[in-house]
Image: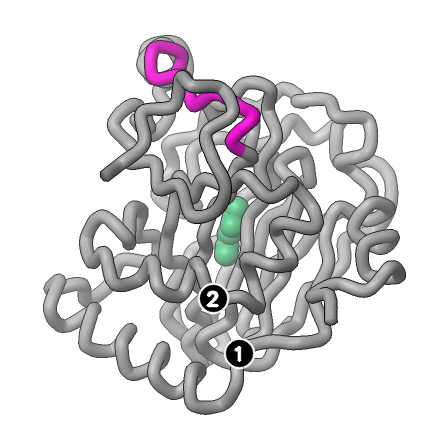
Amino acid sequence: MQALNPEEIERYQQDGIVVPAKGFDPATVAAMHAKLDSFLVDQGITDADYVPDIIERDPSWLDYAVRPEILDAVAQLIGEDIIVWGSALFCKAGKGGRATPWHQDGHYWPIRPLETVTAWIAIDDVNTENSCLRVIPGSHRDRVSYSHDTDNSDAIILNQVLKPEHLEGAPPRDIELAPGRFSIHDVYLVHGANPNNSGKRRAGMVFRYMPATSHFDRELAAQQVREMGVLDLSRRKLHLVRGVDRTGRNDIQR
Ligand SMILES: O=C(O)CCC(=O)C(=O)O
């Protein structure tokens, strides 16, 4: 059986995001929850709401990125040659959890052609109350990278903010997820999240997948840091998790 049925693929193409019917089983959810708790202790992380490079900090997180529930769905969307190039934890405390500004991911990602998807996995129960991910359905369809402003304010977790004029269009949709369920979103999709002051933690793990027909361009990454002051992605490790590197130019982690 395919991970995504034709209706789900159609929904992804229309909306730029899909929540597959099948998430992780309860035992996997429990293991992931426990692993997050010990990971936060081991890493001495007490109040960080955004922690990049989770797999680099603890390579065993890659086991979750390659679970068939996710990888089979990703393969249906980007093809059978797949590189995991990013991971992050968005773990917002129940009080003072900072907002994620409206943004498009690909705006500062050094992948050419710019094709990549993100799986956002709920570790906690994630809903409107504790500020789940919000998206503008269909905002990916034109395949346009809109302009962003740089905002280094402490109130938000990313410093690239979509210019407000690009927010017109469909109303935002909240992506509510039970623990173990995940969404997959397109690189051009406009998304963000409200601050969390609900009293309930809101933890989600993300893994980023690019087709190995695209090139992860480290020089471009360094240039983007110089020109935009964005997070430095130039030393990201590339994990080939299925198929082969079709470009022959991606320096895959061995
Ligand atoms: O979880 C969030 O608040 C933001 C997640 C996000 O921006 C992403 O996964 O690309």
- Residue underneath mark 2: 67
Return the x and y of residue 108 as percentages of the image width and height: 48, 24
* Magenta run includes residue 251: no
Q: Are marks 2 and 1 in contact (CB under 8 Å)?
A: yes
Q: Quadrant of the C terminus?
A: top left
Which mark is drawn over residue 24? Answer: 1
User: Considering only vertical position in the picture, is 95 above or below 151?
Assistant: below
Which residue shows up at 33% across the image and 30% down it? 231
For marks 2 and 1 on the same chain, the one whose residue lies earlier in the sequence: 1
Q: What separation in Å lies between label 2 and label 1 (alpha carbons)?
A: 9 Å
Mark 2 is on which residue type?
Answer: Arg
Say left or right for 219 vs 187: left
Q: Is residue 191 visible?
A: yes
Which residue shows up at 78% across the image and 38% down it? 139
Mark 1 is on which residue type?
Answer: Phe
Q: Residues within 10 Å of mark 2 (few under 14, many from 20)?
A: few
* Magenta run includes residue 217: yes
Q: Quadrant of the N terminus?
A: bottom right
Q: Magenta span covers which residues?
A: 212-220
Q: Is residue 96 visible?
A: no
User: Considering only vertical position in the picture, is 72 above or below 78?
Assistant: below
